[in-house]
Amino acid sequence: MEDKKKIQVNISKEALEEINDLKDKLNLGSISDVIRSSLKLTRYIELEKEAGNEIIIRNRKSNKEKEVVFIK
């Protein structure tokens, strides 16, 4: 059985609304699933940055690109 830890966090009403919105949009079952998904994405981005890569968003309609900058 997986060793799980329970945590408690304080977040704003707006942040909770964003989490629930993501849960619905991504068809995830729980807030925990949203957090796990967000952690995976954040880790992926960090690994790409550590490898010297850039994160680029391309608009499918106009084919224009923009770099996504993450500030620490």
Image: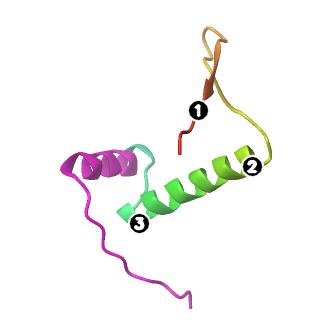
- The residue at the far right in this view is 51
Image quadrant containing the N terminus: bottom right
Determine crowd level at label 3: few under 14, some 14-19, many 20+ residues with C-alpha closer than 10 A: few
- The residue at the far left in this view is 13
Residue 13 in view, yes or no: yes
Task: Determine the secondary structure under disc 3.
Answer: helix
Instruction: Provide the residue span drawn in magenta.
Output: 1-24
- Identify the residue shown where x is 63% and y is 56%: 43
**Left or right of 29 on screen, residue 10:** left
Query: Can you say whether 50 is above or below 1 in the image?
Result: above
Q: Nearer the viewer, residue 2 or 9?
A: 9
Which comes before the other along the chain, label 3 or label 1? 3
Badge 2 amino acid: Glu
Badge 1 amino acid: Val
- Identify the residue shown where x is 23% and y is 45%: 14
- The location of residue 51, given as percent across then percent down, is 80, 47
